[in-house]
Image: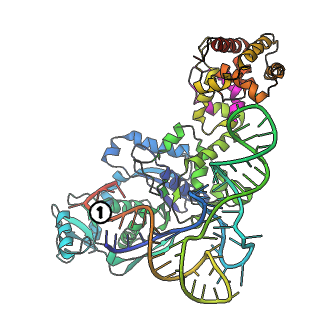
Amino acid sequence: MHAGPRFRFAPSPTGSFHVGGARTALQNWALARRVGGTFVLRIEDTDEARNRPEWTQGILDALAWIGISADDPHFEGPYFQSSYADAHLAAAQRLFDDGLAYYCDLTSEQVQQRAKDLGINGYDGYSRDRGLGPGPGRVLRFRVPDGATVVDDLVRGEVTFDNTTIEDFVLVRGNGTPVFLLANVVDDIEMAITDVVRAEEHLPNTPKQQLLWQALGRQAPRWAHVPVLVNEQRKKLSKRRDKVALEQYRDEGYLAEAMVNYLMTLGWTPPGAEAAGSEIVSWTEIEAAFQLEDVTHSPAFFDVKKLGAFNGEYIRMLPLDEFVDRAGAELPVDWDRDRFAAIAPHIQQRLTTLREIPDKIDFLFWPDGAVVQYDDESWAKAFDPDWAAPLLADVINVYEGLVDWSADNLKVGLEDVMSGYELKLGKAQAPVRVAVTGRSVGPPLFESMEVLGQSETLRRLSMAVAATASGGGR
RNA sequence: GCCCCCAUCGUCUAGUGGCCUAGGACACCACCCUUUCAAGGUGGCGGCACGGGUUCGAAUCCCGUUGGGGGUGCCA
């Protein structure tokens, strides 16, 4: 337990973890650790969520993936909103007793009707002075005081709201249950939260919350509203339209380090990034430097392309054995791990995500004797020249006699053959590549053939020669 | 409707009145390297929304316009 500031992160379980949530979690985490404070996790659970413990576990897993570990001394929780229900109602009662809230018997339809008739917006304070007590169907409303509410925001400065634009909002529903806004504030008070760092979409509700803190006799926390993440249409990232599930990126082979780094550069630039000519920064550096005052004010487009660029860099930075390890998890279980390790150094530089690996090297793992499925376009291009088939035959001859089956020798062998055709390596390798891999692009050819082995390589080469003789790739 | 926020290359951003001929990153283009594809290297394209002020001087301060976003429930 740390004595410092207490940052809260309060996700609602929905079955998937939003990348925007991941970013605010990370920001809270960086701050909490840097200032020696606490990251307080509170699950805003609902009835549905309570019946689905795996949703809560999903949040914990997602947080752990991006480096926010429940075992860390700066981590506290998880707490659950539902377990504070009594406190929510007690607070409501206090507000009523103190005259800071009052009951109203208007239904929402009636409120709407009144607004329409009077030509006003929302609720007009109809029951403010009617002295109603609690009763079935009656809601408890907060008595918004006169004046103005100034929200002092760490990223935006002072934001002033005229209290006349804030209607007497509901605290407790007609059925006796507290609304989210009240629950939220009471929870924050119960958990002694001192810093609320969250997405900008919550800014308009902040004056209500601040008023509630004050009415409950507490000093409001420090607020910070960071810009939202948007899609290419500049709309808030939504589950419906956009790819926002952190788990999905994880499953597609994005590295947590890359995701974390990218997320943190949205709305903030690590100091020194410009001088270094790179935005790739370690978490240690991020944690040491991140501060709310430096966060941008405008929404940021979540650019998967740039994420991919970061991811590629992180993959390339991995030590080879670690790359083999992590990539191994993405491979079909029946693939020979030693064989993969042999080709690994040659594909590490060619990836955006780990997920792409199988498609790039599947030809190394076809069962022996398999019929090569040629890509039509690749075949047509490689075997269109009339030298292709004869060259392949010559290559087979040379390769059959190779004693030391190594990439270097394979290269020399092809070079010997191609000199007779006055070809450059770039051209000459094409039919060989298509014959062996079925495609015109892929990992370095000679290294691939070395891994494939002599007999299987020769078999495939012969197969292609036979196919040219019969007039096509299929 | 009402309230709030925002506005620098296509995108993410640096910039807090003179260091700005507006810098970097991603993307894009060209060239180099090259065993296809990448990676790497070099170079290029490309921006202060608009209009008024303030000031000797404005991307930077003020006002307005326009544009974008968010909020606005007896949802969470």
Q: Is B8 situated left or right of A52 in this image?
A: right
Residue A437 location, x and y as percent? 65, 22
Image x and y of residue B43, in percent: 77, 55
Q: Which residues are magenta?
A: A326-348
Name which residue type carries label 1.
Ala
Tell me the residue that label 1 is attached to.
A90
Q: Tell which of A446 and A288 is nearer to you.
A: A446
Is A52 placed above or below A43 here? above
Look at the magenta stretch and give its main secondary structure. Answer: helix
Measuring from the top left, give residue A318's x and y in whole percent.
69, 39
Q: How is the image coloured?
A: rainbow
The kind of secondary structure element at disc 1 is helix
Q: Is residue A346 magenta?
A: yes
Query: Residue B73 sits in which quadrant?
Result: bottom left
Residue in the image at 37% along x and 72% along y: A211
Confirm whether the magenta stretch covers residue A181.
no
